[in-house]
Image: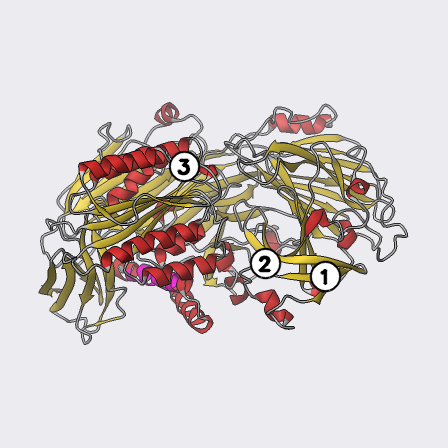
Amino acid sequence: MLLLLGLCLGLPLCAGAQGEPRSWGDTSEQVALRVPRQVRLLQRLKTKPLMTEFSVKSTIISRYAFTTVACRLLNRASEDQEVEFQMQIPAAAFITNFTMLIGDEVYRGEIIEREKKDGDRVKEKRNKTAEDNGEKGTEVFRASLVIPSKDKAAFFLSYEELLQRRLGKYEHVVSVRPQQLAGRLSVEVNILEQSGIASLQVLPLQNSRQKGSGRGEDDSGPPPSTVINQNETFAKIVFKPSVVQQAKIAQNGILGDFIVRYDVNREQSIGDIQVLNGYFVHYFAPKDLPPLPKNVVFVLDSSASMVGTKLRQTKDALFTILHDLRPQDRFSIIGFSNRIKVWKDHLIAVTPDHVRDGKVYIHHMSPTGGTDINGALQRAIALLNNYMAQDDIEDRSVSLIIFLTDGKPTVGETHTLTILNNTREAARGRICIFTIGIGNDVDFRLLERLSLENCGLTRHVQEEEDAGSQLIGFYDEIRTPLLSDIRVDYPASAVEHATKTLFPNYFNGSEIIVAGKLVDRQLDQLHVEVTASNSKKFVILKADVPVGPQKVGGDLPGSPGPRGDGEEDPNPLERLWSYLMVKELLSSWLQSNDGREKERLRQRAQALAVSRRFLTPFTTMRLKKPGPPSGSLEEAHGLSAAVGPEPVLQSLRGASTLPGPALEKPHEPRIKISKTSVDGDPHFVVDFPASRLTVCFNIDGQPGDILRLVSDHVDSGVTVNGELIGAPAPPNGHKKQRTYFGTITILVNKPERSYLEITPNRVILDGGDRLVLPCNRSVVVGSRGLEVSVSANANVTVTIQGSIAFVILIHLYKKPAPFQRNHLGFYISSSHGLSGGCHGLLGQFLHQEAELTEEPRGLGRNLTHLLSSQVPEPSEAVLKVKGRRVPVVWKQRKIYNGEEQVDCWFARNSAATLIDGEYRDYLASHPFDTEMTLGLGMPEGR
């Protein structure tokens, strides 16, 4: 029995942004004519497992949501079948439990500590710990297993989240995408709010998580079969469509998002304080206050990549926003590419003439050049600092930068840490930066930290979404600042372990939340003070709030939160406090640059997450089977697990499996493979692990060229060639064209001859019987020492005699730009079986060593420091490889489809002094050409 687990983080190799299967290329050729008759017969008889039930139940108590998903399946076929369960969850949610039933066997999830050596890599993979990351989208939880013939299986997934108030509403979103019509489908949402439910709305099903400007209400009503029961403090919403109703919505089972919006009553100006069993939560959302004046600088990316729809939509949105500015506001506009273009060198008042002139300036912006993010931010901050330095300014105001880009820093200062430090030092905590990233090429990690470190928020707009409507929607959330410099105080003798109590701004329609513990559980009332600035006034609110015993969520059906056997329902306010505390610790960990402080924060976040059963970057989930031990669970059931954007299974037959299947968040690279690879346009990376050095180089070939990557035909019998395809270069780039690998061919000559041809759409295996495997299906085939494992739309793993393994990454574009092509990346996972005489552009380095003979100036002779430090500017050195002296320069390069960044020494001029021979020596005459003269008796130097 086989099990795969994975957590998809919204990367290009995953399903679409909303979890819908993408349409990938032409897969019309499924099985070639030479497939044995028995195999074809089995494929015709194969029946997809039937989903008998898909149900979601959410219980929301005081804005804190507990959600459990149940999915039951039946294998009606006469053979074992693999099935995948997938569920989109909000990006801000924490998974708390996962349980599987296979027949009568139960596997339960256990949250445990993640080893520090893995935790240290979290910052390189994903840092989604910003306070406001929900709008970045969703994560897709995936689990796959094999159901025995005529048997059943079930999945149960639980997660928790604190609902954020935006534009005056809380929004709870449930993904209803079972991928097929379900025999029984139901969504139940229970809401209990002690302060009373002021408004409640169920929206039509939506297949886009981006809600646009939010300025209008959708009046088309809830989905068919929805039933709403509501009283003053409690609401129950049930969506239970029949199979016929499901089919009318979507025959493929992808119904969309079931969305509930609501708000609560607010009476006290000091806010709403709720207490339960020693924990409290304080909701503060004042209204009817005069708005604060805004000093706002709009910073718009006008580089070449913004050409077309993105820039047009953004301009239209800014026209709307400029009309929305208030007379007391001040504003300016900056466009940036490789040049910084400032509309006015000072902030100006909002008048009809100035708004008109600003619109004209925006209209004439044209896309060109690179992306100078650091320069644009520095100019924007300088404008605001100069204005705030004026002595005649009496009104208290809020200074904001709204920054929009679709790329990475390519001009001026490009080092991330330097940009962050420059911005933080210039802003000095007085300016809040709100960032919007558009598309898949944006450096969202940089934007996230820019906002996080400068009291702002961030949003990510998908490539296919309307950038203009998202910009307007984002602006709507921050268009009306009501308070600044908010401080919430409680008596130190009454409250301990409170979450954050200082907030830079409060915007109309949002909410400030503080949670903590009461020192005395018998406390009758709690003294609260809130101080803040509003326009020309300094606001002080004081109150003694009754906090007598309360029953929160007492009579709700269902069981919120994770429980062990015999445990009572958890305290929802304790869960809410834990959620906020873990989020804040992760945020502080992300911002800290001090190693000792970072480790302390990591340990605190990890301990709290384990005790509260939260799956976080510092914890992992391990499945275990209850009952007396009967050897390894994995050995008994053939369990194997891999974590990442797509579940990846290697070695289905005769291989040892991973001890302790783990579901981790965030993901690690899908497969543990060497850095030695060629990917992209094409970029080569060669790892010398014994020397602790990594070397990289580029090869500028021509479309149609077939390059020899690994040539070991004489000894191991393995040859790998790659054929280049062409594409136009991006606008204003330094290249005339791009080239990628469109086909990888592998010839295995021992013990018997087999041919493999791999493209982004299919794998052809010819080793006697010819098989054609589509790349949009996960499958494993193998015989005679050769095994081919296809992970749908993700990668192909080729294992030869158990000692040689190659991984071919599949790069697919749903809506490719003119300069993008579906292509492949080639990675060497294991080279133990390749001989010392192996050659080819990659193969010639597999059994070599390298050393630096001349070190970069300014770094001394401390190579350890050199290898571990971040070098802000290119540093030159000389590398000795195979007796040759090769000038190299320090560089950073992304591999594993951009999931990991490596530092390497870059050899210029198409590696002319690094590789043996010349470029033409590596050209093959046909895809399976094995003739390679280089490497046979070549001298060590030249």
Give the distance between the C-alpha atoms of the residues marked 1 and 2, in whole angstroms.
15 Å
Q: Main secondary structure of the magenta part?
A: helix
* Left or right placement of residue 670 versus residue 755 in this view: left
Q: Is residue 585 magenta?
A: yes
Residue flagged by tag 3: what amino acid is it? Glu
Relative to 491, does residue 771 appear above or below in the rendering? Answer: above
Give the distance between the C-alpha atoms of the residues marked 3 and 1, in whole angstroms.
62 Å
Select label 2 or label 3 by which is in front: 2
On the image, numbered disc 2 is attached to which residue? 874
Q: Position of residue 737 (x, y in %)?
A: 62, 35
Tell me if residue 767 can be seen.
yes
Badge 2 local density, few (<14 within 10 Å), some, or many (20+)? some
Identify which residue is drawn at 29% across, 45% down: 344
Secondary structure beneath dot 2 equals loop
Residue flagged by tag 2: what amino acid is it? Pro
Select label 3 or label 1 by which is in front: 1
Identify which residue is drawn at 32% across, 41% down: 173
Toward the viewer: 797 or 825? 825
Tell me if residue 183 can be seen.
no
Residue flagged by tag 1: what amino acid is it? Leu
On the image, numbered disc 3 is attached to which residue? 53
Relative to 523, does residue 752 appear above or below in the rendering? Answer: above
Identify which residue is drawn at 60% across, 70% down: 859
Q: How many marks?
A: 3
On the image, numbered disc 1 is attached to which residue? 879
Earlier sequence position, callout 2 versus callout 3: 3
Badge 1 local density, few (<14 within 10 Å), some, or many (20+)? many
Q: Position of residue 765 (x, y in %)?
A: 73, 34
Q: Position of residue 692 (x, y in %)?
A: 67, 64
Q: Is residue 867 magenta?
A: no
Earlier sequence position, callout 3 versus callout 1: 3
